[in-house]
Each structure stands twice: as structure tokens, then as C-alpha cells.
Image (spheres, rainbow, N blue to C red):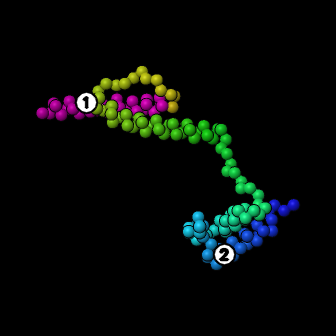
Amino acid sequence: MAKYSKKAQDKVGDVMREMKKGKLRSGKGGKGGKVKSRKQAIAIGLSEAREEGAKVPKKKAAPKKSASKKSATKKTAVKKSATKKAGTKKAASKKSSTKKSGTKKSAGKKSAVKKAGTKKATKKKSTKKTAKKKAGKK
């Protein structure tokens, strides 16, 4: 048994000829750009055949992501946001001399905050030393 009806085949053929002449356009009402891709022309022909009631198989659904891939993408997104937040906290902590500690954070955020904390401490020490040197010179 055929997957596509004769009507659908004829419609795709008509659309392909239209594309080769350069008159096939994509978009609503044919107001889009010229169709240059063979695959796009076939897709347009099949969709028009569906609208006319010709026998055409249903469109294939996009493949779904597996659960492990979804969780992996979420973890990387959390890590990226944690490093961005740590960067904004650096600027705020330079103004205040007190160090915040003892707050509960998730495992991914802890490592980012620890790294940021060590950088903060070294920067504070160096700024104090330079301030003392400047004061001693005056």
C-alpha cells in the first residue's frame, strides 16, 4: 500500500517546478523569501497536499532528550549561574570589610563561592599592604 497518494505526488511535482522557475516563496501568503532548498520545497508541497486532503503520512516528531542529558544541561546551567553570582559578590564584598560565612548553599555553589572567597582574601591583603606602604611614604 502506498504511503503517498497520487494527488500528493502531483502537488509536490507542481511545487518543485515552481521552485525551479524561481516563483516559489515561503511564509504566510507567499510573502516570505524565495525557496532555494529542495527539501523546503518538498515540505511545502506535502503541507499543501495535506491541506487539500491528500493521503500524506503525519509529520515526524522531534526526538526527545533523555533524562540524563536533561539533568546534565541543568547542572551546567547551575554552575554557570553560580560563577556569575560569585563575580557580582566580589564587587560588593570589596566595599564591606566583614566576611559572610556560615550560609548553607548547594554543593555546586559551594565550590564557586570557596574559589571566590580565596581570591577575595588575597586581594584584601594586598590592598592593605599597599595602603600601609603609601601611608609610610607620606
Residue depicted at x 43% and y 23%: 103
Q: Quadrant of the C terminus?
A: top left
What is the x, y in percent for residue 11? 73, 70
Q: Secondary structure at mark 1?
A: helix
List the single residue furthest toward the front: 52
Q: Secondary structure at mark 2?
A: helix
Q: Can you tell which mark lies on residue 58? A: none
Q: For the residues marked 1 and 2, what is the alpha-carbon distance in whole angstroms?
A: 76 Å
Q: Is residue 100 left or right of residue 68?
A: left
Q: Please name the amino acid that badge 1 sits on.
A: Lys
Which of discs 1 and 2 lies nearer the camera? The answer is 2
Q: Is residue 126 magenta?
A: yes
Q: Which residues make up the magenta segment?
A: 109-138
In front of the other: 137 or 54: 54
Residue at image mark 1 = 128
In front of the other: 134 or 92: 92
List the single residue furthest toward the left: 138
Q: Quadrant of the N terminus?
A: bottom right
List the single residue furthest toward the bottom: 21
Residue at image mark 2 = 18
Residue depicted at x 18% and y 34%: 134
Q: Is residue 54 left or right of residue 102?
A: right
- Which of the 4 image quadrants contains residue 135? top left
